[in-house]
Image: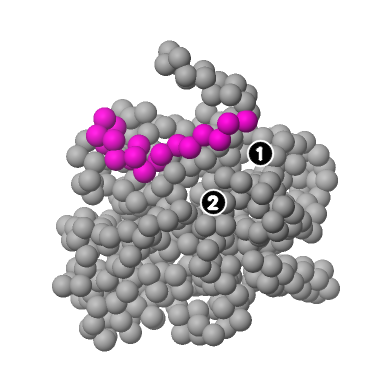
Amino acid sequence: MESGNSIMDSMLPALKGEDWKRVRSVVSPTFTTGKIKKMMNIVKQCCQTLLQNLQKVSDNGKPYKVKELYGAFSMDVIASSAFSTKLDSHNDPQNKFVQTAKKAFSTGFAVRVSLHQLMPRLMKFLGVPVFLPQPTEFFKQVTLQIIEERKRTGQTRNDFLQLLMDTAQEVAQEQKWESVSDQEDITSNYEQVDSTQPAIKTTSNKHLSLDELVGNCVIFFLAAYDTTATTLNFASYLLALNPEIQENAYKEIREVLQRCKGELTYEALQEMKYLDNIISETLRLYPPAPRLERIADVEAKLGDTGITIPKGMLVTIPSYALHKDPQYFPDPDKFDPDRFNLEERTKRNPYAYLPFGAGPRNCVGMRFALMEAKVCLAHIVANFEMQRCSETKVPLEFCLGPGVLHAKSIILKLKERKERIALK
């Protein structure tokens, strides 16, 4: 899906062949356990801002729109972790970064993405961009300024841009096989899919170009902002409708933190298996991407069906439908985190559950996204109870259209816990 814009065409999802292998081999090691740990503190800092905003909601006692607060939280995390920019976008919505980022997701974004997938040559000929030029140029200039400032001062940070720059340098100096699955964590819920995929060997010792650096910071923002906020929206809704599950999550958080002296370390986070299951079950019921698309690299025959997929054909995988198939998930509309206990997972075809895709082109930022969602939910459940109210829609109503799955509105009430858990 070429757009004709050098930055957009340098984003990982747009690349093909050797260029894709080279950039993927640099980006993938940015999400190893060690580097995710470095970025976790950024997420925890943003959670403190979120808790302050949630406290105001709780004190007010009125129902609130979940999307607004989680959208602001997600914006703050991405701005800080990808662009070294500290925000409180909920209380400072006029900030230039916030305004520009919202323009990137302005009305028509999902439509433009779909049109470029369906008619890439025509869209390129007509000059219809996937991303609007002004936000793209803004992010480019922000990235350039950060790079130049760090070169000038020698200062470094534990953010995505720095880790990407450092990894590009490491890969350029030493070609090697990289593994991002160096420790069991929340991604173990997807291990049967991911472990079958070979690591990607560096094919060139070339550094990332400036356009590739900028493009992959931008796609990190675009991919993580809306999807993470949406997952948190749905998780809060499901916990509000299932208070017994929410209480079990609270008990697990309390027990783990008692053992860890109140400090939410990466290791403590991995002990919260029930919280893993809650997030996984949320993603089953409401996958941010309700369908996946791939282009066949080779001609393929589908088992004994007699169906042949020719090379170059666009294949759509209906992940939302798979997640609701009773053959794989009995009573599929029920919210049941226990579906993701180890014993249950091993019974199931791993390709029946695809919230992050599968294969070499699965979501490279999966580990970061899951860590962010889990840290956020741990902070919220430790301090507040999410409750349904008269304005809570049951069942949910969804926005129609391509792109990320959105509910029209999720409205809940928030109650401060009598026994709050202070997280360090």
Say which residue appears at 81% left-offset and 71% top-offset.
Answer: 148
Dot 2 alpha-carbon crowd within 10 angstroms: few under 14, some 14 to 19, many 20 or more: some
Secondary-structure class at tag 2: helix
In the image, residue 317 lies in the stretch drawn in magenta: yes
- Residue 238 percent location from the top left of the image: 25, 58
Above or below, 299 against 207 in this view is above
Q: Which residue is mark 1?
A: 178
Above or below, 182 against 400 in this view is above
Residue 421 visible to an observer of this rendering: no
- Residue type at numbered disc 2: Ser
Residue 337 visible to an observer of this rendering: yes
- Residue 52 percent location from the top left of the image: 39, 81
| Range covered by the magenta-colored residues | 312-329
Say which residue appears at 66% left-offset and 59% top-offset.
Answer: 128
Disc number for residue 207: none
- Residue 138 percent location from the top left of the image: 69, 72
In the image, residue 406 lies in the stretch drawn in magenta: no
Q: Which residue is mark 2?
A: 114
